[in-house]
Image (cartoon, coloured by chain):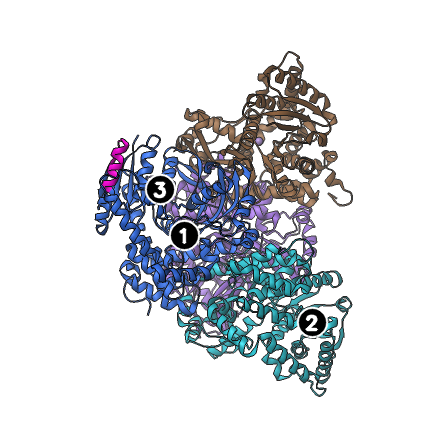
Chain colours: A cyan, B blue, C brown, D purple
Amino acid sequence: MSVKLVVIGGGSSYTPEIIEGVIRRFDSLPITEISLVDIEEGKDKLIVIANLAKRMIEKSGKTIQLSWTLDRRQALKNADFVSTQIRVGGLNAREKDERIPLKHGFIGQETNGAGGIMKAFRTIPILLELAEDVHEICPNAWIINFTNPAGIVTEALLKHSAHKKVIGVCNIPFNMIHSTAEILNADPSQVKIEFVGMNHFVFGQRVFVDGINRTDEVLTSLARENLDYSPANIVSLGWSKGFINSMKLLPNPYHQYYYQTTDILSKDKEALKEHGTRAEIVKNLEKSLFTIYSNKDLNVKPKELEERGGAFYSDVACSLIDSIYNNKEDIQTVNTFNDGAIAELPNDSVIEANCLITKNGPKPIAIGSLPAQVKGDILQMKSFEELVILASISGDYNQAYQAFIANPLIKDERKVKSLLDELLCAHKECLPQFNKGGKGNE
Amino acid sequence: MSVKLVVIGGGSSYTPEIIEGVIRRFDSLPITEISLVDIEEGKDKLIVIANLAKRMIEKSGKTIQLSWTLDRRQALKNADFVSTQIRVGGLNAREKDERIPLKHGFIGQETNGAGGIMKAFRTIPILLELAEDVHEICPNAWIINFTNPAGIVTEALLKHSAHKKVIGVCNIPFNMIHSTAEILNADPSQVKIEFVGMNHFVFGQRVFVDGINRTDEVLTSLARENLDYSPANIVSLGWSKGFINSMKLLPNPYHQYYYQTTDILSKDKEALKEHGTRAEIVKNLEKSLFTIYSNKDLNVKPKELEERGGAFYSDVACSLIDSIYNNKEDIQTVNTFNDGAIAELPNDSVIEANCLITKNGPKPIAIGSLPAQVKGDILQMKSFEELVILASISGDYNQAYQAFIANPLIKDERKVKSLLDELLCAHKECLPQFNKGGKGNE
Amino acid sequence: MSVKLVVIGGGSSYTPEIIEGVIRRFDSLPITEISLVDIEEGKDKLIVIANLAKRMIEKSGKTIQLSWTLDRRQALKNADFVSTQIRVGGLNAREKDERIPLKHGFIGQETNGAGGIMKAFRTIPILLELAEDVHEICPNAWIINFTNPAGIVTEALLKHSAHKKVIGVCNIPFNMIHSTAEILNADPSQVKIEFVGMNHFVFGQRVFVDGINRTDEVLTSLARENLDYSPANIVSLGWSKGFINSMKLLPNPYHQYYYQTTDILSKDKEALKEHGTRAEIVKNLEKSLFTIYSNKDLNVKPKELEERGGAFYSDVACSLIDSIYNNKEDIQTVNTFNDGAIAELPNDSVIEANCLITKNGPKPIAIGSLPAQVKGDILQMKSFEELVILASISGDYNQAYQAFIANPLIKDERKVKSLLDELLCAHKECLPQFNKGGKGNE
Amino acid sequence: MSVKLVVIGGGSSYTPEIIEGVIRRFDSLPITEISLVDIEEGKDKLIVIANLAKRMIEKSGKTIQLSWTLDRRQALKNADFVSTQIRVGGLNAREKDERIPLKHGFIGQETNGAGGIMKAFRTIPILLELAEDVHEICPNAWIINFTNPAGIVTEALLKHSAHKKVIGVCNIPFNMIHSTAEILNADPSQVKIEFVGMNHFVFGQRVFVDGINRTDEVLTSLARENLDYSPANIVSLGWSKGFINSMKLLPNPYHQYYYQTTDILSKDKEALKEHGTRAEIVKNLEKSLFTIYSNKDLNVKPKELEERGGAFYSDVACSLIDSIYNNKEDIQTVNTFNDGAIAELPNDSVIEANCLITKNGPKPIAIGSLPAQVKGDILQMKSFEELVILASISGDYNQAYQAFIANPLIKDERKVKSLLDELLCAHKECLPQFNKGGKGNE
Ligand SMILES: [Mn+2]
Ligand SMILES: [Mn+2]
Ligand SMILES: [Mn+2]
Ligand SMILES: [Mn+2]
């Protein structure tokens, strides 16, 4: 048996993680062919990555054939799995997503608030095209979507492309399990969290270690102010005792944007003054990473990669591919159709849920009713996501406006228009759907 | 035929409106007995009102027997309709509802935000007792609930008391129809608005004049910045063109708290400095009203009453009583069980909806799906309301905390505890359910 | 103002009822133009009807211009209302619908069981074409669908055509109100029944006379065995005391097919032996009706018409048109989108419900949850209806089979195939969608 | 670690299966204490079983302490698992369930139709008492309910007792997997069926062998007329080719009662004439089984037991207990709360579904929408089940009547009363809730 993996956005600095994950799992998951795909603008980085990957494979002694190409359709031939990790407009676009909202008095963030919406607007049309290519060229392949906002993008693909084998992944549930395991002094493999919600808005309802409910211990730990269990890319302010004690749920690091809005906004404004946006930091990180990657003696994933926020991302993806390929029937937390798991959401909403993973993809474990204390917030966010998807596809100015109003970080109708207009203008080149001529933001 | 009306909170300055409404409709709606009920603390005002009411009746020549009492259960005997317009804790409590949140950086308002929550906490247990009395003493009587937050209170009564004949009323839909009629140069009786949502969070979806859809004209008018169609008690900033054009819905005046939060907060802070809270203004208004009322030559509803926010309130209530009594089968906008009218809400959610009014009470006209652009906001508000009701009844500190977090005007977990704690403490005497000893806000 | 009505199936023997209704309401509802449309095969009858209609109009002295045509698209120009009362395949098809099922041991009936399914299969594609014509030629016109199975046909049009102004009507609710009024010795205009369900499967939940609940009296009367309140075309066996007492609902006459299946089947078999199917009786009725219609001295609706089952049908339709045209905002019982009125059904299910009738069409009064005692039966019938619609459009043999299995009068998998195959074969000419070649009932 | 199992109905002829299952799994599932409980009337059989069980344990060499008692509350002390396999009224009651309906022209069956309803009426009150005992005495114990109608009984316990650790089991899914494995020449452990529905009304949607979809092969085999994959207690007529080909679902053996009603009824009537009811056959089977059991040399489960219908029942139960005890996180098909798994059913409906089994019990895998072709039938059966539960608890005659009407095997309102009345009378002693004096079937 042999498996072909195509990496869309292969020139990403994260790719060495995937390569390492593939090598490590080779005996149970025989990925014998990897094709790294990127666009013309990313060619130089793609070649650096491809060369590093080849050195890693050579060192491993595994019989994996690795190639790179700018011809996506060619690469898709015979693919079994297609991972996507693209950034439309690059880090420059991210910088705008972060800077412009701050200027208007809103949190600038790449997956939440106005920045996240713009990223969705830029990304969804591109990935819908990819999904159509996959459906035509390798209809049995699974798309494993890493690209943020991962939940929204996955829902857009599952609802609006013909290709229905799409799974979204994020490292947040994985991180939460690991942090919780640390709190409980347990092995992560023993820890199960009952997740509920959507990507970057997921809560933990209960924590089990070997089937024993130990939620209270975890909550008690979290309520000790400032306990930090966030990934590298999110600086946490910690959760207040009152919040944890009253809500009785494990928040995820992104919840700070929604429940600590004022403080985060202040912090972000200060940080901007001091050292620019996260995009600019990442640009430097990337520069040094690629310098390291270019070293022809390097033949392993360098430790520096872990400082990027996406650590474990590829672990998550490789585990998922492994379970699909081997029909493992284990439980992993991924983004897929709700199919009734959360009673208050439609079947075709995408949720981040504990799923049984089989050769036929993920099926969520039924959750039942949303917890009352966050039911409204979850429904509100899901409704916001739906508006983002509609606007991403239609390019309709009014729908974009509605998505902005529906976002709890924006909502302020007296400031939306200037914010939206500046963002649409700044990202003009990446938003052809909003510039079909004629109508628009008069 | 003869009808008995009991007015709970009969000492309210609004009562002369009801008396006038009853007199005006006497020929079709023979209310021959009115009992004004209040509590010991309100006895003086009650007597002033009762005397004015008697003079008004005398002048009208109608055979209406009016009495006042502090004995609620006695008054309820043989009642057909029971209207409620109480203010637990009086204007002093309202002042706290307005001042304390502002101090913590939140909008202080008596039906929205932290103030509205506290008002619900104080009011719901008292009105649940009333409902049980009604159910025991005059089980066929309809409770017409004016008391704010009217939607939440009505849902609490309908869900948690044995008495199921409860209808909530508000003058906002009535005002919106009148303002819209003015915009369209039409008679209010010709104008129909398709409302969707809940009390103080209701939107107009479409406007019809004699069955002709004239929504666009109304939206165009509203989009002209600063068009004011708010009642006397709400100073409006006007809606931005972009908001109206993109949302394509008629907001109600209370929506400014949710969609213009920052500006309203600034305005309220300034107003506080300049002339105190609205409670304090109302205290003065009330003082002069009662001076006027005490004038023994006054035998009509004085014009000054209209400067209070509740103008038309009694029109709304008397129309409702009229249609019930006469089985009119007309359409009025009231608060009642959803019963499927909004597909996304449970049957036992209370919504503010166009209803067919019969002798058997209101039945909403089916609405179908919530408009996508506000679906999330409406579901979020409803979920918030559910938490308020639960906490109002249980007196559970954590549920109160959850209600605060779920309110879109609060939400900030780093400030909730001090805000909540100060409010619970300030209103201690009106919140026995939160002070059952032992547990609570340690 | 002037209104144009187009009658599709104008050659129907029912048309004189409509003409009479139009004449009677002329002062409030100025239908000044009527176009009777039929197909080539019906031309002779169409001319007879048109001539009678002209004599009726002349006698009335109203300025109504009546014409007939075989050119449907021509007739639709400037139409305001389009009524449909067609019978694809004529009474010969009906005879097959009745005879063939009986031969296989099933009830043969034209709107229920196998016969009703076949009628839907023949009718839906034809009326979908009509709806598309209407949408193109007179997009503001309302289609008033009389054609049976009226509920299923209406749902098919509302779901599957671009034209959304479609209302289905039936005389059953009208009859139930009249029979109930008789039972209660009240005027039908005072009687309101709370209906729940779908066309020909609608129940009455509560009966009000001038707003007073008198359900129990009605149930007591119905429980007196053999009380007959069925229309002329349905011979009733009466309902057992136990059934009425335990179910506490008013059944409609068609319910006998579902709750008295064995006895009705026996009765139908005997009737078949004695005097043939209902189709054959109707053929004779029609023959004599047209003889009467042809009498050039006849200038009124002849009394004999009432012996046909459809009495009051046109009353129902003319009332509906009147309320739409005059934006009456009254309550009528019609078939339209559920839009949440019944909480257990999707918004786009068509139900038969009490609706507010305005210029913008009908909006159901919210019903809430289905009554527990018939919830399952109603959901089962609705699911059956959905299968019929899918098969009507797709012409898929398996879907047709599924519809047969789902029908509670059939269900028997060991007999379905031969029944279905014989019916598909017998109606071959009227079922082009099932004969697209290739696939099908091998 | 040690585990205590209490067997309610320990004198059942099935008990040796459980004993054997416990012995076989002893190494992974250390059930060290078994208490067999029965009632006075079953004492003799209980002693026979207990002695056989002791011999079996002795032979196995496992350290299992086995005892018997008539004192249920005593037995429950320290229980970890409580299995229930009772038959209220014994086989005599079953005989009535089978004979009386046949006399009235209806299928007489112990879990379907009128017989199944009566069994529910007799059983639910008794098991609700048990559940309350468990909740008081051993609140952490899981009730594993074997007792039929297992789905209805489980829903009754989960909805109406305080004890929420209740799981219903049936051998039908297990049998379907085994028969399917045979068809596909695969090992049962490799075969997964996606089940949808309720106990005894469950369908297989898709069949996977090692994750490969092989549904079509299975359907093709089933469509070969008369392929029998029924358990010993159900004589199958086989499914018609047309049914399998069109429905594209795997029926379960009990579906024959619903989709082959006429033929089964004829068969049952004939069988009755020839050799009495199934109850009578089982009486004889039981007699010989107990003779065998009494043989003091017997120390293994005798082969003859497999001729009873419940083969594998204990396999199902022991596997379930094993996975709970060991937190196995495997997938088993059991009866538990829907919790959204089937979008059309409420969270608190009990469904028979593939569940993840953990120490915290079963959680269904999300199913999404019901398959269109059986959606109506499943909803109808579920609604029927709800009526049965309500009547079981209330003892209300009208609700019992409604349950009879709602059952698709009965439904005939002209025969329900005499059928119901005779059954209520025949089972009078086991139905105290229907005989609380006063009201009832006048
Ligand atoms: Mn992520
Ligand atoms: Mn109000
Ligand atoms: Mn009809
Ligand atoms: Mn079973």
Q: Nearer the viewer, residue C19 or C259?
A: C19
| Residue A331 placement: quadrant | bottom right
Numbered badge on residue A9? 2
| Residue C219 placement: quadrant | top left
The nearer-to-camera label among 1 and 3 is: 1
Numbered badge on residue B234? 1
- Answer above or below: position of B437 versus C210: below
Q: Is residue D306 magenta?
A: no
Residue visible at 67% across and 57% down in the picture: D215
How far is mark 3 from mark 2, CA to CA?
66 Å
Residue D304, visible in the rendered structure: no
Q: Position of residue A378 (x, y in %)?
A: 50, 61
Q: Is residue C103 left or right of residue A402?
A: right
- Answer above or below: position of D403 versus A57: above
Residue D243, visible in the rendered structure: yes
Numbered badge on residue B314? 3
Residue visible at 45% across and 54% down in the picture: B382
What amino acid does circle 1 point to? Ile
The nearer-to-camera label among 3 and 2 is: 3
Callout 1 and callout 3 share a chain? yes
- Answer above or below: position of B361 versus A208: above
Magenta part of the chain = B50-65
Near mark 1 (Cα within 10 A), the count class, few <14, some 14-19 or many ≥20, is some
| Residue A138 placement: quadrant | bottom right
